[in-house]
Image (tube, rainbow, N blue to C red):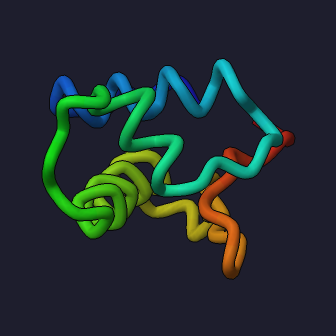
Amino acid sequence: EGREIRLTAKEFLLLKYFIEHQGRVLSRDILLSDVWGYAYTGGTRTVDVHIRRLRKALNGNTGQDLIRTVRGGGYSLDNSI
């Protein structure tokens, strides 16, 4: 939409990873290992928190959810972007 959004460094890396793997379902474990690194010892809930913040930044007032939750699978970036 041509609007600027502000992201933290981790949110930016997460968005970049989603764009590079657009349309694929990415599990929390994959996101933790590839975005946070194997040395990350936190739980998978941190992924959920970052996804929620990234969704809020991306969606703005559009009401369109660009990141979809795949029940039992993980997350996927909408192919229509």
In-image side of 35 versus 25 (left or right): left
Q: Quadrant of the N terminus?
A: top right
Q: Residue at x 18, y 24 (%)?
A: 9
Q: Is residue 15 above or below residue 27?
A: above
Looking at this rendering, what residue extends furthest in the bottom direction? Answer: 71
Q: Residue at x 85, y 41 (%)?
A: 80
Q: Is residue 44 left or right of residue 67?
A: left
Q: Residue 45: x and y, percent?
A: 27, 69
Spot occupied by residue 46 in the image (x, y as percentages of width and height): 23, 60
Give the residue drawn at x 48%, y 56%. Answer: 28
Hey, which quadrant is residue 12 in on the image? top left
**Quarter location, residue 32:** top left
Q: Is residue 53 left or right of residue 54?
A: left
Image quadrant occupied by the C terminus: top right
Residue at position x 19%, y 30% in the image: 39
Q: Position of residue 71 (x, y in %)?
A: 69, 80
Q: Report whether residue 6 is seen.
A: no
Q: How many numbered circles are shown?
A: 0
Q: Is residue 16 above or below residue 59?
A: above
| Residue 56, image x, y percentages | 35, 59
Q: Quadrant of residue 42?
A: bottom left
- Residue 23 visible? The answer is yes
Towards the viewer: 35 or 39: 39
